[in-house]
Image (spheres, helix red, strand yellow):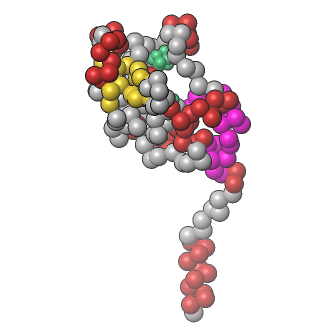
Amino acid sequence: MAEGKRGATRRGRKRRVAHAGDAPFWKRKTLKEMSQTEWESLCDGCGKCCLLKLEDWESGEVSYTDVACRGLDHTSCQCRFYTTRKQEVPDCIVLKPAMVARFSWLPRTCAYRLISEGKDLAWWHPLVSGDPESVHEAGISVRGRIQSETDVDEDGLGDHIVTWPE
Ligand code: SF4
Ligand code: SF4
């Protein structure tokens, strides 16, 4: 009796067995294996990497400020001139897979850093949640807590150091 019941129940609740090919691309591929579209979609849109940073000359330690690059849209947290960003802001760092060894300066929540360290994406990442707003709703993005470099005296940047991007 137990056997019959078990068999019937299983037929009614058949579940698909996951295969390696079912895993999302960021779990199957290295950064270098990703297509351009996959690579671009990996960015969660937090805007943290577009904050101005200060580097300690002696220790090399990088500190984030709450001052954003003039190209960052404070609401969408997207670059206003993404396709021409290198021309508009010459010191903008365009991330490439080959730079993986230098990703340690990126915030710990950054998808590129997470994947390069063998970690998974969090629930709020748009690729996981399916909602581009989730990165903002989870309080991960810079929305609502930054000011533009155009409004801040460069000599006073040290007064704007913050720890929350980490
Ligand atoms: S920190 Fe990483 S995930 Fe966030 S905007 Fe920059 S590149 Fe994208
Ligand atoms: S130019 Fe755009 S992508 Fe580069 S740091 Fe500024 S806002 Fe960010």
Front residue of this view, candidates 50 and 72: 50
- Whether residue 87 sits left or right of residue 70 in the image: it is right
Magenta segment: does it hold 32? yes
- Whether residue 10 sits left or right of residue 149 in the image: it is right
Quadrant in the picture for the C terminus: top left
Residue at image coords 69%, 57%:
19
Q: Quadrant of residue 139?
A: top left
Can you name the residue that lies furthest to the bottom here? 1
Residue 89: image location, x then y, percent: 50, 10
Can you name the residue that lies furthest to the top here? 87
| Residue 66 in view here | no
Residue at image coords 52%, 13%:
91
Residue at image coords 41%, 16%:
69
Question: Overall secondary structure of the magenta stretch?
Answer: helix
Residue 23: image location, x then y, percent: 63, 50
* Range of magenta residues: 22-42
| Residue 20 in view here | yes
Is residue 19 placed above or below 26 in the rendered structure? below
Residue 113: image location, x then y, percent: 54, 38
Quadrant in the picture for the N terminus: bottom right
Q: Quadrant of residue 2?
A: bottom right
Front residue of this view, candidates 9 and 44: 44
Is residue 128 placed above or below 145 in the rendered structure? below
Is residue 1 placed above or below 90 in the rendered structure? below
Residue 146: image location, x then y, percent: 31, 23
Front residue of this view, candidates 128 and 157: 157
